[in-house]
Amino acid sequence: MLGRTANDLFWLSRYVERAENMARLLEVGYRIVLLPREGQGFHEEWRSTLESTGCAESYERKFGQINTRDVVDFLLFDPDNPSSIYSCLSAARRNARAQRTAMTRDMWECLNSSWLEFSAIKPESVTSNALPGLLDWIRGRSALFRGTMLNTILRNDTYYFSQLGTFLERADNTARILDVKYYVLLPSSEVVGGGIDNFQWVAILRSVSAHRSYRWVYKENYKPWRIAEYLILNKQMPRSLGYSYVEVETALEGLGDYYHHRQACQATVANTVTLLDCGDINAIFQSGLHEFLQDFIARNNKLGAEIADTYHFSG
Amino acid sequence: MVTSYFDEMYGSGGTVRQPYAMVAEWLGTQRVADLKSKHDEAEALFRRTGITFSVYNDNAPAERLIPFDIVPRIISASEWRQLSAGIEQRVRALNAFMYDIYHRQEILKAGRIPAELIVQNEAFVPEMIGVEPPLGIYSHIIGIDIVRTSENEFLVLEDNTRTPSGVSYMLENRETMMHMFPDLFSRNRVAPVENYPINLLRTLESVAPRGLDREPVIAVLTPGLYNSAYFEHAFLADEMGVEIVEGRDLVVRDGALHMQTTLGLRQVDVLYRRIDDDFLDPLVFRKDSMLGVPGVMDVYRSGRTTIVNAPGAGIADDKAIYSYIPEIIEFYTGRAPILKNVPTRNCRRPDDLAYVLENLDKLVVKEVHGSGGYGMLVGPAASAAEIEAFRRKLTARPSNYIAQPTLALSTCPTLVDAGLAPRHLDLRPFVLIGDQVRLVPGGLTRVALRQGSLVVNSSQGGGTKDTWVLQD
């Protein structure tokens, strides 16, 4: 496989995953903004959404003030924002077009029709009433693409590079969401808390589609350290850091086997997997949740770069 | 000015010709509204599959569909036998001509073609002199543009010996028709075209460097995503199961051509390039080319990688050479051409130029190096001002132009806004030359969708039709 093909497949998966996460974050942000609240509370909510998607600075530069309509447009449709859903789908489709030969016809058609439909939407036609439907649709298209991929792609390097893209991106997203909101999970906020914090906790779970499954797993009310444990360490949870790294490790092993050559990045990923395996949420809180997440995000980035180096593609 | 045209379905007399009997009967039972909804369905299919080409208007690239017409163009078995014999003769002669031109130049010594027409030609590549391409073949994939002017007259309008495109439309048009009208195929014996990609692969394998101790590694070289024919490049690579590469994926190392893979460098043995000679190697041709591979010409000349079609193959489809093709065929095959040329005037000859200037309103004038229907004048359809503007260009650089009579291109019923109406068309069969000549029965039929228009190029608003060759 060409190094460029590996690069395009890897990023294609990342973009699709990123678009889906963006849709989820928008959905949650919008929900919270709708809650009855004193004053300008929605500012804080949108600010943290912008921060967890890494768009805060570019938004600030372009608009200055936070305004729901602007934020929604910026995150959904703005071609100037490289993380907007528009930019993600456009880039995913461009990569897919460049790698038509590496993907199945079903995958290509799924992505191509998603792009054709999405790019035909006029931003001004997306009223507040239409927004939830559109966000649902985006998540649905992303799920359809993943499903189509899993059901049609050959289990060779095309598959492994796609899986790596998906799960490195997912781990990064979940870690960022937690990091931006870590203060609402800190023990002290339980006391200061009250209604809002409870909503915030649920919002965190919702942004990774985990508010129902939490109850199945823990059979108790939302507790901040449980939420953190769930999203960081629990491997039953398909968007947790722990689970994402099980997939990353599996894909790297698959590549090593497929190419008959064990690579150093397999050892790197094993380190992080061990860290998550042996992790204890109390210890993590004690030494600092924020520090832990920052360290994880850095490790995750480094692993991405190491994979690109190893397999002769650079992002 | 021609007033009546030969119609593929109705001939010259108005009665349905035999090859079209079944389709004419079927069309008679269809309502125009139903045909139109079928047409829309077909276009939706093309868009979803991404069968688009890029056009550049106002510098903004846009993806367009080539309009697809659902009424097939049909060729009988006996017509095809005639055509394929003529095509095979022609492509063998063209390759013999190129071998000669880049070696002993006997045809020039014999005085059959003026030498300055070759040596001063931009399409002539001196770096190719003395190079021995595998099997002596220069142009492995040739698209021959053929027009029909009467029941028995097929004429070659143009040869495309560099990087002819359109074959993916031939294949996708058939897929679409079979998907939408399976009935028609069960009632007509239509020869399949689906072997083209495997034939292409066999052809490429057959010209791999001699003495390889492994299966040849083949790659398709594309200028990239934004090229107008990108879909086709990816389509062919996918169908053949070979890599599609860009210049930046390739590198010359230790005298061999390699592509950069996830496992490091891998040698490439046959490069099916879909970029022009000019961009192939910045060390030899255009120095600013970002699309090619520095050093690839040296690798090619040393015989370690085969480039398909060979650099310099454009010398055979130059429009100034075109008028000499009948002589070329006779010179190298010893026989008269089976397929005739359109009578052509070379404006470099003073008497021809005088004639052309006299008759601009009746002639089609083309640039010698132009393609895609750009830069040409269709006299009968042009305004007086357009003719005058063209006259100035022609007088300034006569040798840059050739002229042909306005041909009575045949028509075929085509679905337009008002219903079914005759529209002019041509035919481009794709022929493969390697260890043998391979020609799938069919080709790309291009149709001029505007009433009365004779320009079928997709860049000028032309559409395509599925092309059926019937079996006996």
Image: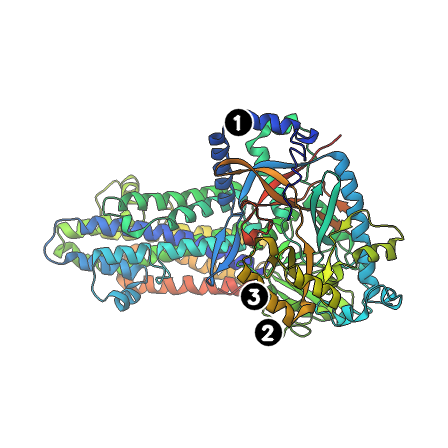
Q: Label 1 amino acid?
A: Gln
Tell if the residue under mark 2 belongs to the same chain as the one under mark 3: yes
Q: Is residue A251 left or right of residue B292?
A: left
* Mark sitting earlier along the chain (3/1): 1
Q: Are marks 1 and 2 in contact (CB under 8 Å)?
A: no
Q: Secondary structure at mark 3?
A: helix
B9 over B375 or under it: above or below: above
Per the image, the residue denoted by label 3 is: B389
* Residue position marked by numbered label 1 in the rendering: B30
Q: Is residue B419 left or right of residue B288?
A: left
How far, Cα to Cα, is label 3 from label 1? 47 Å
Which of the two marks, 3 or 1, is nearer to us in this view?
3
> Farthest residue toward the front?
B358
**Picture coordinates of residue B208, whole percent (x, y):** 77, 57
Q: Say yes or no: labels 3 and 1 on the same chain.
A: yes
Instruction: Identify which amino acid the numbered label 3 is placed on.
Output: Ala
